[in-house]
Image (cartoon, rainbow, N blue to C red):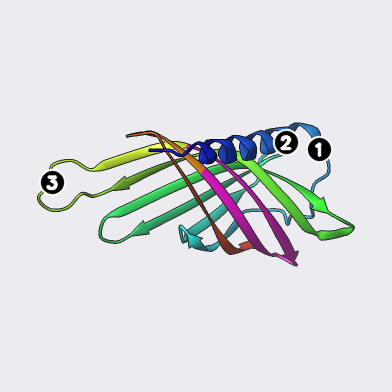
C-alpha cells in the first residue's frame, strides 16, 4: 500500500523535472560521446549515458543479482551548470523502469513490475570522467501500485 506522502514526493519531483526541462537552456560542460560506468547505491549496477541530437541525453542503469533479479531504469536527462563552475552541474529528468524477479524453483511465474520515475542529482566533470550523486523516486504501476525511492553515487568515463 502506498502512503500519501510518497505520492506527493514523487509528484513534486516529476513536476520539478518537467518544469526545469522546459525552462532552461544552459548546458553543463558534458564531454562528447558515450559515457559508461558504475553506480553504487539502490540499485547498484552499470550506467550508460548516450548523447542525443536534442537537449537531453539518455541515461540507462542496469542492475541484477545473478540468482533472481534484473532491473532496467531509463531517464531523459537534462543538464545545466550549477553556479559559476562549468564542471559542476545539476541534472534531472523523467523516466521509466522495468524489473523482473525470479520467484524460485518451485514457482511457475516470474514477477514483472514496471512504472515511471523521476531523477535529480549533481555531477562533476573531470576531463572525460563524470562523478555523480542522484536521487530517484519511482511509482510502480504494473503488478501493483507502489512507491519507492533509490539513488546512488556513480562514476562514468566518456569515449
- Residue at the outermost left position: 106
On-image quarter of the C terminus: bottom right
Q: Nearer the viewer, residue 97 or 136?
A: 136
- Residue occupying image coordinates x 63% and y 60%: 133
The residue identified by callout 2 is: 21
What numbered label is drawn on residue 24? 1
The tag earlier along the polypeptide, 3 or 1, is: 1
- Residue occupying image coordinates x 31% and y 54%: 69
Are dots 1 and 2 in contact, CB under 8 Å? Answer: yes
Residue 108 left/right relative to 136: left
The residue identified by callout 3 is: 107
Numbered disc 2: secondary structure? helix
- Residue at the outermost right position: 84
- Residue at the outermost front position: 4
Q: Nearer the viewer, residue 136 or 36?
A: 136
Where in the figure is residue 75, as x and y percent of width and height?
57, 42
What numbered label is drawn on residue 136? none
Magenta-drawn segment: 116-137
Q: Is residue 159 visible?
A: no
- Residue occupying image coordinates x 50% and y 36%: 4
Circle 2 crowding by C-alpha within 10 Å: few under 14, some 14–19, many from 20: many
Amino acid at each position: 500500500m502506498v502512503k500519501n506522502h510518497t505520492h506527493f514526493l514523487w509528484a513534486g519531483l516529476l513536476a520539478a523535472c518537467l518544469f526545469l526541462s522546459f525552462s532552461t537552456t544552459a548546458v553543463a560542460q558534458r564531454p562528447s560521446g558515450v559515457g559508461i560506468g558504475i553506480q553504487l547505491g539502490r540499485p547498484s549496477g552499470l550506467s550508460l549515458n548516450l548523447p542525443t541530437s536534442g537537449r537531453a541525453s539518455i541515461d540507462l542503469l542496469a542492475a541484477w543479482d545473478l540468482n533472481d533479479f534484473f532491473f532496467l531504469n531509463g531517464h531523459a536527462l537534462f543538464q545545466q551548470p550549477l553556479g559559476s563552475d562549468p564542471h559542476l552541474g545539476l541534472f534531472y529528468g523523467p523516466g521509466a523502469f522495468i524489473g523482473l524477479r525470479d520467484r524460485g524453483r518451485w514457482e511457475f511465474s516470474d514477477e514483472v513490475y514496471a512504472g515511471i520515475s523521476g531523477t535529480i542529482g549533481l555531477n562533476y566533470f573531470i576531463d572525460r570522467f563524470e562523478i555523480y550523486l542522484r536521487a530517484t523516486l519511482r511509482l510502480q504501476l504494473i503488478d501493483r501500485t507502489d512507491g519507492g525511492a533509490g539513488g546512488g553515487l556513480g562514476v562514468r568515463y566518456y569515449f
